[in-house]
Image (tube, rainbow, N blue to C red):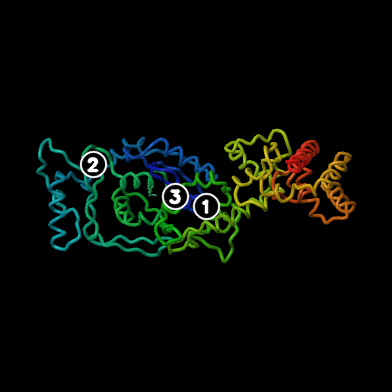
């Protein structure tokens, strides 16, 4: 048997972290077992489905690199198929027309509630032939009235629901459109889905869906219902907790590798291992390893993982993801050091890619002024000698390497009989504009000779002006 899973979002909003985690688990399970992964857009709710949401979901999947083997399928393109199966169920006596009006149903509900019973459809039209002419109707599925539905949830274990708990579900509305639960069943069957991995919020639909599958003589897939994600306050994760859209994490400077690693661990474990490359996830992932309990979102851990991946991924890979941020922050890197070299020396100093760009500007662009605090502290008349001397030596230096620059800075301090800091700090502020930069020799090496000398000259000018004002 070839394993086939699906991700079946309703396009009523962006791809949120909960959906992304479900997609990841579904994708991993298929891919870890040599199977296939299907993307299905459940757009039957025409009022609430939008093209923007469809695009946002696919963008999110692409950014996370969760590629699908089939689809995207759209339920709205499959209405004929649903209708013909509804017709078949009617013919076989496994579905029926119900002519109850909204008022009648409401009355039914109120009576049941008043009697302390569970509100449910009472089966009024289940076995009737005396259909009124020209009146609107819905079509209901004839749910079995005895016995129970049993399934072995891969995460939650054996679940049994008595059929007496389930009323006759509407499968076609009065406007002729098929309802959600019916479409899911037909799709899972037609698409050959062997394992349904989805959110716990659908667990109540499963017994109903199994009954419909049985009526259609379709095979029953395995089910795995994944728990909720909660915010760090124990409440269901929502916008209140900050970013929940996958693309917002991209915008804030997270690497997809970090978010994927975060999401895989959020509800799944393999011993106490925290770091999982995509290859390792594929090697180790099992549905049985998914936690039954809800998991709490922890931004600090995501940041930690992001730092880990910024530091450890090949700089070229980080560079690929940096492009978007460079554009966003309008930093032109066409003139200046290779971005990979800048990444290498900045990697362990930043938490996000957005930050990486904003602290790397001086490698590519001249700045208008020195950071006020740093300049006040380090660009003082006493620093003139050091800056002049180091500029002279840099000017004479042909071999522009980290090692040679290191020697130049050391020699300057030695010749002036001062500590390294007395040369290093003014020089750092001069070339980078602030008191923060990676190691000075590496920084100057990447900034380049011309730019460094020009900036030291500007710093000296700044000191002179200050002296004379
Ligand atoms: N369309 C449903 C949702 O977005 C998922 C249904 C399913 O996975 O069966 O919640």
- Marks 1 and 3, how far apart at CA: 14 Å
Q: Secondary structure at mark 3?
A: helix
At x 28%, y 61%, the residue is 148
Residue at image mark 2: 173
Tell me what residue is drawn at x 88 percent, y 55 percent.
Answer: 417
Dot placed on the residue nearer the N-terminal end, 3 or 2: 3
Q: Is mark 3 within 8 Å of ligand 1?
A: yes
Where residue 19 is drawn, which disc sits there? 3
Q: Which of pointers 3 and 2 indicates the residue nearer the eye? A: 3
| Residue 8, horizontal then vertical, whole percent | 41, 46
Residue under numbered circle 1: 28
The quadrant of the picture occupied by the C terminus is top right
Separation of disc 3 and disc 2 at Cα? 28 Å
Give x and y (percent) for residue 413: 86, 52
Q: Which quarter of the figure has residue 158?
A: bottom left
195 shown above or below 251: below
Where in the figure is residue 289, as x and y percent of width and height?
A: 50, 62
């Amino acid at each position: 048997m070839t394993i086939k899973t699906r991700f079946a979002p309703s396009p009523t909003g962006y791809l949120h972290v909960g959906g992304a985690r479900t997609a990841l688990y579904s994708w991993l399970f298929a891919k870890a077992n040599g199977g296939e992964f299907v993307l299905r857009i459940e757009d039957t709710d025409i009022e609430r489905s939008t093209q923007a949401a469809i695009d946002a979901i696919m963008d999110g999947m692409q950014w996370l690199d969760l590629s699908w083997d089939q689809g995207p399928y759209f339920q709205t393109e499959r209405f004929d198929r649903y209708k013909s199966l509804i017709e078949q169920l009617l013919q076989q006596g496994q579905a029926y027309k119900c002519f109850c009006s909204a008022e009648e149903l409401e009355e039914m509900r109120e009576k049941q509630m008043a009697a302390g019973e569970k509100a449910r459809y009472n089966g009024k039209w289940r076995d009737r032939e005396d259909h009124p002419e020209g009146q609107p109707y819905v079509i209901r599925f004839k749910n079995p009235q005895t016995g129970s539905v049993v399934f072995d949830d891969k995460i939650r274990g054996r679940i049994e629901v008595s059929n007496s708990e389930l009323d006759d579900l509407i499968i076609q509305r009065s406007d002729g459109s098929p309802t959600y639960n019916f479409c899911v069943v037909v799709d899972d069957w037609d698409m050959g889905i062997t394992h349904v991995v989805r959110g716990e919020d659908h667990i109540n639909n499963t017994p109903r869906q199994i009954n419909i599958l049985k009526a259609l003589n379709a095979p029953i897939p395995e089910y795995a219902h994944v728990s909720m994600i909660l915010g760090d306050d124990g409440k269901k994760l929502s916008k209140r907790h900050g970013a929940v859209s996958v693309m917002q994490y991209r915008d804030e400077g997270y690497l997809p590798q970090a978010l994927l690693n975060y999401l895989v661990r959020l509800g799944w474990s393999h011993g106490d291992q925290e770091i999982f490359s995509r290859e390792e996830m594929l090697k180790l992932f099992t549905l049985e390893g998914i936690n039954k309990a809800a998991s709490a979102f922890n931004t600090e851990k995501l940041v930690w993982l992001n730092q880990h991946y910024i530091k450890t991924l090949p700089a070229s890979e980080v560079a690929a993801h940096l492009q978007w941020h460079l554009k966003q922050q309008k930093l032109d890197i066409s003139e200046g050091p290779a971005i990979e070299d800048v990444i290498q020396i900045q990697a362990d100093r930043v938490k996000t890619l957005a930050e990486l760009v904003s602290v790397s500007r001086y490698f590519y662009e001249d700045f208008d002024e020195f950071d006020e605090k740093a300049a006040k502290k380090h660009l003082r008349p006493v620093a003139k000698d050091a800056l002049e001397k180091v500029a002279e030596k840099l000017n004479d230096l042909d071999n522009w390497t980290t090692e040679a620059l290191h020697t130049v800075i050391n020699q300057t301090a030695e010749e002036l009989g001062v500590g390294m800091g007395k040369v290093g700090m003014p020089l750092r502020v001069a070339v980078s504009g602030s008191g923060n930069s990676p190691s000075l020799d590496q920084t100057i090496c990447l900034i380049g000779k011309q730019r460094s000398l020009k900036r030291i000259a500007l710093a000296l000018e700044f000191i002179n002006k200050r002296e004379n004002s």
